[in-house]
Image (cartoon, rainbow, N blue to C red):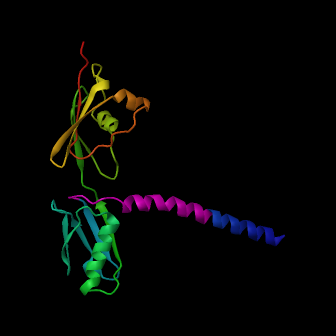
Amino acid sequence: MRLPLVLLILVWALLFTATFAQEEKPAASATADYVLQPSDLLHVLVFQEDDLQRDVRISQEYSITLPLIGQVNLKGKTLREAEELIRSRYDQDYLVKPQVTVTVTEYAKTSVNVLGSVGQAGSVVFTPEQPMTLLDAIARAGGFTRLADRKHVSLSRTVDGKVEKYTINADELIQGDAKQSWILIKDDVIYVPEKLL
């Protein structure tokens, strides 16, 4: 009688552990894949080296300055790549196999402008860890007015110094028929025209 009970407890423990491990992975990888931006505030921790612990803000040139190793360029680096870079810099001349943890304690704010036939035209601010779609930004700007031409919403985006313009049918987005949801990036400009009467 005792053997089935022990097996049942063992199976339950394995299932619980597997479920918990699966739930933990996506959040960790999403954070690890985050590409660092200027004005992000980082907490840099070197295990058992309290004097090297720092809270540093990434400069507009994508760099931070840390004790002993000086300036570190983080342009284009994900959170995990930044950890590895800092670890390797300390490992070169100062510490033996250091364990470095980097976390973002405050994300840089990003904004887009929503203009035209919306409830409250202006700047919409969001953080990079919570991506914003075109419809989210319009909703945050008070939604479409009664006279809005939802089939000809304009999106202007600057990429590598060149302005790209798109005309988007927001009705298709609302109905879920569009091929993409139009995730916004910093300084995008959305313009909602009025219907021609």
* Quadrant in which the N terminus is drawn: bottom right
Quadrant of residue 79 within the rendered picture: bottom left
Say if the magenta span includes residue 2. Answer: no
Image coordinates for residue 131, horizontal then vertical, percent: 34, 47
Q: Is residue 7 above or below residue 89?
A: above
Of the pair 109 and 160, the residue shown nearer to us: 160
In this rendered view, identify the residue nearer to me: 175 or 44: 175
> What residue is rendered at 43% in x and 31% in y?
177
Number of callouts in the render? 0
Q: Is residue 122 left or right of residue 84?
A: left
Q: Residue at x 30, y 36 (%)?
A: 140
In which quarter of the view is residue 54 placed?
bottom left
Q: Quadrant of residue 151?
A: top left
Q: Please give left or right for residue 18 compared with residue 178 in the image.
A: right
- Residue at the extreme right: 1
* Quadrant that contains the C terminus: top left
Observer-nearest of 107 and 95: 95
Magenta segment: does it hold 27? yes
Query: Which residue appears farthest toward the top when viewing the image?
Result: 197
Q: Which residues are magenta?
A: 16-39
Q: Is residue 46 shown above or below 159? A: below
Horizontal and vertical percent for residue 102?
A: 32, 69
Depth check, front residue: 100 or 167:
167
How far across and down, in percent of the image, does residue 168 sit?
30, 31
Residue 126 position, x and y percent, is 28, 46
Check the image and report above or below for 158 versus 143.
below
Q: Residue at x 20, y 79 (%)?
A: 69
- Residue drawn at (15%, 47%) of the image: 161
Main secondary-structure element of the magenta-colored stretch: helix
